[in-house]
Image (cartoon, rainbow, N blue to C red):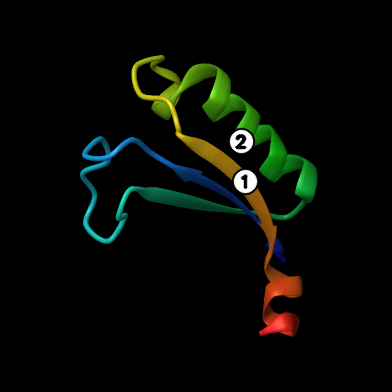
Amino acid sequence: MKEWTSNAEWPEGQIMQPRALGKTIDYHETESAAKAVCRMLERDGLGGEGKIFPVRTWTDNIKEKKNAG
């Protein structure tokens, strides 16, 4: 079950996907996998191309958010 997300906020106008609103999210089974994706985005940029880099990245525990909410 995927319980973690990796999240990234991108510079204004750089992400042109409907509903993205400058942010992307991916789902992961473990916290370490989510953190690894964040590190990779910070190091290599969007798609690993080294052209667009996130303003910030973070991870969230989906279960904790559901229980808090």
User: Which residue is identified by label 1?
Assistant: 58
Horizontal side, residue 47 vs residue 21: left or right = right
Q: How far apart are the two marked residues, 2 and 1, measured between alpha carbons?
A: 7 Å
Element type at marker 1? strand
* Residue indicated by mark 2: 38
Question: Which callout, 2 or 1, points at the residue further toward the start of the chain?
Answer: 2
At mark 2, the secondary structure is helix
Measuring from the top left, give residue 3's x and y in whole percent: 71, 64
Q: Nearer the viewer, residue 28 or 21?
A: 21
Quadrant in the rendering for residue 14 = top left
Figure quadrant of the N terminus: bottom right
Q: What residue type is disc 2 on? A: Cys
Q: Nearer the viewer, residue 27 or 16?
A: 16
Measuring from the top left, give residue 22's x and y in whole percent. 33, 48
Q: Foreground: 26 or 39?
A: 39
What residue is shown at x 78% (from left), y 41% (from top)? 32
Image side of residue 34 versus residue 30, left or right: left
Label pair 2/1, CB-CB below 8 angstroms? yes
